[in-house]
Amino acid sequence: MSLAKLVPMRAFHHPDQALHDPEVFMRFGRLVPAKDQPERTQRLLAALARRGVAVEAPEPVGLAPILRVHSPDYLRFLETLWPRWSALAEAGPVALPNTFPYWSGRPDWQSRPACPATGLTGQAGWYLGDLASAVGPHTWTSALRSAETAARAAEAVLAGENRVYALCRPSGHHARADRASGFCYLNNTAVAAQRLRQKFARVAILDVDAHHGDGTQQIFYLRDDVLTISLHADPADYYPFYTGYAGEIGQGAGGGCNLNLPLPHGSGAAAMRAALDQAVRRIASFGAQALVVALGFDAHRRDPLSVLAWDSEDFGAIGRSLRGLALPTLAVQEGGYALDVIGDCLEAFLAGWDEA
């Protein structure tokens, strides 16, 4: 298929996303070099260039669309954390918590109350959910630009575009309404879906990252206007461990509006496509009017964090699966840490999407 015949696609990315450069995260009892390196975006931008896709830098949108997803106290914490942290007499090179409060995880709460602790150490344990959410001097700027990228991409869909790609870094799908975790600080996918609700009464989210989209699930778990589907590795022995099981179907008004499709570790293309077919049928039966794809590439067999066995070309099947839905669609970049293959994964997805 020639480029002249392809369905036009717009893409958004802000260069400030590269400023976030976390030094470490915890893995098997060791603080090791972080996997979310700024070079990830360069590899993905190069893939877009090879496909002839021009990239637009989004204009600022401010906090308004983000506040529709995240609690004000959490945003204040993130915005002010680094200046407060760096002023500590014994501050380390990144902000990390050393205590985590017990919380019941009540699904009927949209978010927890504001942190009762006034000290920085206590607040860090409340708002940073694990040791994979290090905050450095530029984390807030990059996370804000990433969320703004998703918001502006959603606005392009609202304006009539049918295919839009938001290159977002840091990723977002582990970020809950009031907590960072798993390399994620602001939930870009949720920001985009909520923005689409300005026009579309029913929006679906299809998360195809290797890890369960636990933050996205939490944000929409009580709602019936946004369908959340996550296709991921079985979390019984894989991050995020405590969510992502098939029995989690939503609660209250949101009952039946959450679908988890955990895959056995080692699964390849066949299991992925079977789950993908199930997801597509559910999106159609939900009556979705627009779709957000949370697009992760860490299911690739060569990804350093993967327990699945997908190949680069398998991501083309995800793009092709959008054909039958024929919905205005926004793809939001999530994970993927194998620098030598993530560009190939994106190209395969775009090639399949072009066929749609």
Image (spheres, helix red, strand yellow):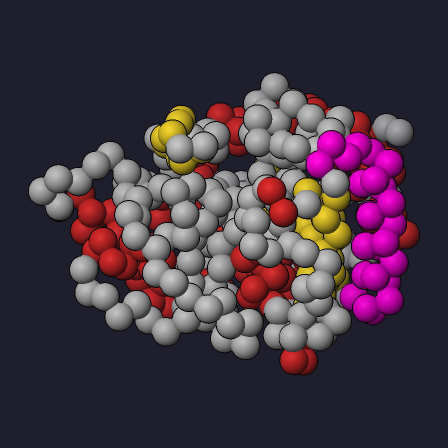
* Image position, residue 247 (x, y; %): 71, 63
Residue 147 appears in the picture as rendered: yes
Q: Please say whether residue 270 is one of the residues in the magenta stretch.
A: yes
- Front one among 93 and 153: 93
- The answer to which of 252 and 81 lies nearer the viewer is 252
Residue at the top extreme of this rendering: 340
Residue 288 in the figure: left or right of residue 151: right
**Residue 150 to residue 319: above or below:** below
Q: Residue at x 30, y 67 (%)?
A: 115
Q: Residue furthest left?
A: 89
Q: Is residue 24 left or right of residue 214?
A: left
Q: Is residue 242 above or below residue 182?
A: below
Q: Which residue does the image show at 34% across and 55% down from the upper left? A: 100
Q: From where the camera sits, is residue 205 visible?
A: no
Q: Is residue 298 above or below residue 243?
A: above
Magenta segment range?
A: 265-288
Query: In which quadrant will I find the C terminus?
Result: top right
Chief secondary structure of the magenta span?
helix
Return the x and y of residue 266 as percentages of the image width and height.
Answer: 74, 32
Quarter of the image holding residue 221? Answer: bottom right
Looking at the rendered image, the quarter that the N terminus falls into is top right
* Identity of the residue drawn at 75% across and 71% down: 256
Asked if residue 2 lies in the magenta stretch, the reply is: no
Residue 279 point in image, percent of width and height: 81, 54
Vertical arrangement, residue 190 with respect to residue 112, above or below: above
